Image (tube, rainbow, N blue to C red):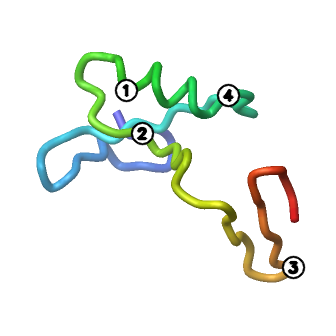
Amino acid sequence: MGGKAKAGPIITDNGNFLIDAPFGEIEDPVGLARTLKMLVGVVEVGLFVNMADAAFFGNSGMFVVGKGGLL
């Protein structure tokens, strides 16, 4: 169902289920995204690969992650 912190399954407006799947540190995010999307019924994954050159994270002590790692 929804796990410890959720009151039930998470369902989108379109009636699709959202599933949290911990993978730990992901060595090959592109390959993992490709493999997951090949599964029957998987519409989208939360791995945003090849979409940006850098991402900004954090509230205090902001840091930037680029293609080569921490910037």
Q: Counting other residues with Cα less than 10 Å from the Cα at mark 3, is it few (<14), some (14-19), or many (20 or more)?
A: few
CB contact under 8 Å: marks 2 and 1: yes
Amino acid carrying label 3: it is Gly
Of the two numbered discs 4 and 2 in the rendering, the one whose residue sits closer to the viewer = 4
CA distance for labels 1 and 3 = 34 Å
The residue to which callout 3 is attached is: 61
Amino acid carrying label 2: it is Val
CA distance for labels 4 and 1 = 14 Å
Q: Position of residue 20 (x, y in %)?
A: 47, 38
Of the two numbered discs 3 and 4 in the rendering, the one whose residue sits closer to the viewer = 4
Q: Position of residue 5 (x, y in %)?
A: 50, 49
- Examine the image and state in which quarter residue 58 appears: bottom right
Mark found first going from the N terminus, 3 or 4: 4
In what element is the residue under mark 1? helix
The residue to which callout 2 is attached is: 45
The front one of 39 and 23 is 39
In what element is the residue under mark 4? loop
Left or right of 19 in this view: 55: right
In what element is the residue under mark 2? loop
